[in-house]
Amino acid sequence: MKINNTFAQILKMTILPKQIIISFFKQMLFWLLFFDCNRIVFLLFNLKYLTGISFWNVLGVFWYSFPLDQSTICYLMWFPFLILFIQNFFTHKILDIVHKIYVLLMLLVILMITTTEIAVYDEWKTKLHYKALLYIMHPSEILSTAPTWQLIVFILFFLIQVVMYFWLYLKFVFQKIVIHKRNYIFAGAYVILMPALLFLGMRGGFHQIPINQSQSYYSNHDILNLTSVNSGWNIISSIGQNYDLLGKNPYQYYDLKDSRRTVKELFNVKNDSTTLVVKTQRPNIVMFILEGWSASLVESQGDKEITPFFHELEKNGLMFTNIYSSGTRSQEGMAAIFSGFPAQTITTIAQEPEKYSKLPSLNKKIKAQGYYSSYYFGGQLIYGNIKSYLSFNEMDKIVEGNNFPSSLPHGKLGIHDEYTFPYFMNELGMQKQPFFSSIFTMSTHSPYDFDMQEKIHWTQFETKYVNSAYYSDNCLRNFFVEAQKQAWYDNTLFILISDHGHSSYPNYDFCTPEYHKIVFLMAGNVIKDEFKGKKVENIGSQVDLAATLLGQMGLKHEEFVWSKDLLQPDCSQFAFYDYYNAFGLVVPGATYLFDVRSNSTGLLRIDSTTHITQSILEKQAKSYMQCVFQDYMDY
């Protein structure tokens, strides 16, 4: 009997305290259900993007999301693990309070991320990442881009979620730990085994390669892959990757010398002369940087109903019909236009003074010829660090929203084109000639609160965006009607180019080149008559503006190593574009897209009319990305 009692006591001491075990795994289940509920909410907010996708394909997000959810939960459970370990010896109520506070803080952080992702998905088509955190450093600009009612809705939605989930946690998950007898055997097993299991879950198992986003990529519909990827895991991974950039190029696919050689061959031209399409090499230059104008907005490449005046301008100018945006954000567009430097997928050089100070400057180059330069924008240029970047470019005058007369009506984001364009024209009349002056339009950016009734009753996507383009086009009409009366008009070259593409009415997928195809037009009376109304079909991007413009001015442009002259007879035809952790290459008859996150070819089109192969496209695209990023790192 004595032996039996001893055995029973030993057995009792080796039984794991149910309170601690139940608490631990209830919390894990809570976080798992919490992440899946957030996915459901995200999908409900974006039902329009699920059109044509089968129910079973959508359902796959809850299966393929599990590996990253499990990894994220294991990260989250380290602190509860420590609290529960301590409570095996010490069960003061302060530990329960600390535990609750930790859960509340995690809910606040994660819900802030997921709610923000819902708010920005229409505009960015991506999850929150390191580059997005750079934008959040200027919250006033972000708040200005959304309608007030939308901000109120999302703030209330965020708070309601926090309260609801924390209440559910307190009601059904939280367990007060009360241990009357210490169990040292359990404590030892717990502190040895549980960290090992958590670490194993964090890295995704015993596999040689730790878990990454590709674990959750399963569909050819990007929205499903993005929904499947855990938001918290994604942003932590993104931050980690960015810190890794301090010492290693993440796009190192080949020997660097080999990649440089491939890129050089891509740019190779036999004849470096150019076709002069302007009557004078020293015209005034007025550049309209069109916020978010996709190529599909203009008649020559899309619909004639949206921007009828732009089509009239085409008749008096030279239209480039195969131009693509380098990146997806305005600051990336500015660096591409004014420095001829491509976007960098996971970071932005325009936000890093120590790097952009090493870039060539189109404005400085033109100013050296005796030009006066200026830049106008109805909003605030602090967003994306654009003002700092422009200041480096030595603009003689920078005018933003606060510098315009206070009497001008203001929208949520700033002063609309209807009011900035006349002010801009008046300023041009007072500037010393020749001048190089740019205006960054605003009204085609959300929240589209310009004063105009809906003119185009669009039945497809982006009704507000389409009407905003119609509004801006009408503002352009009014500008040019008055500009033609000015003495400087006949000697002025007008350049109209987009800063980036947009999710336009054809609803192109974010990864396709069509989504990134933009507007580029040279117009005005300085265009030679034989070129008016003509089209240039050479494939290029914003980075090619610098070399093309300088070529027309008879100026050398060898420092703009990433820019090519689109009017050279032997112009090399290609365009490189990228977005967060993906990049693409467009060449005559073929398109290649590589998705870094899933380490796979995201899109491949090769027409039967071309002899290029996938392996050649892949090497060209990867070499270009590798060299661009290496240059970025070297700056």
Image (cartoon, rainbow, N blue to C red):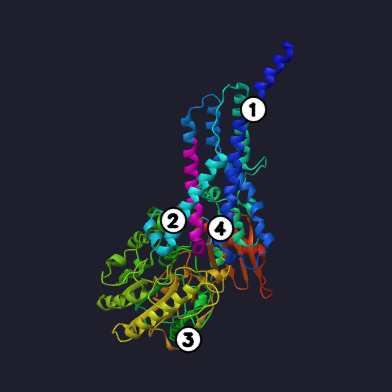
**Res. 94 visible in picture:** yes
Q: Is residue 178 above or below residue 462?
A: above
- State which tag comes first along the sequence, 3 or 4: 4
Q: Which residue is mark 4?
A: 42
Residue 45 or 479: which is nearer the viewer?
45
In the rendered structure, find residue 520 and report the number of the disc placed on it.
none
Q: In the displayed orientation, state which residue is furthest to the bottom.
A: 529
**Res. 247 visible in picture:** no
Q: Are marks 2 and 3 in contact (CB under 8 Å)?
A: no
Q: Viewer-nearest of labels 2 and 3?
A: 2
Q: Which residue is mark 1?
A: 16
Is 546 on the left-hand or right-hand side of 400?
right
The three-letter code of the residue at mark 1 reads Leu
Q: Is residue 240 above or below residue 332?
A: above
Q: CA distance from mark 1 to mark 3?
A: 82 Å
Quadrant position of residue 340: bottom left
The three-letter code of the residue at mark 3 reads Gly
The three-letter code of the residue at mark 4 reads Phe
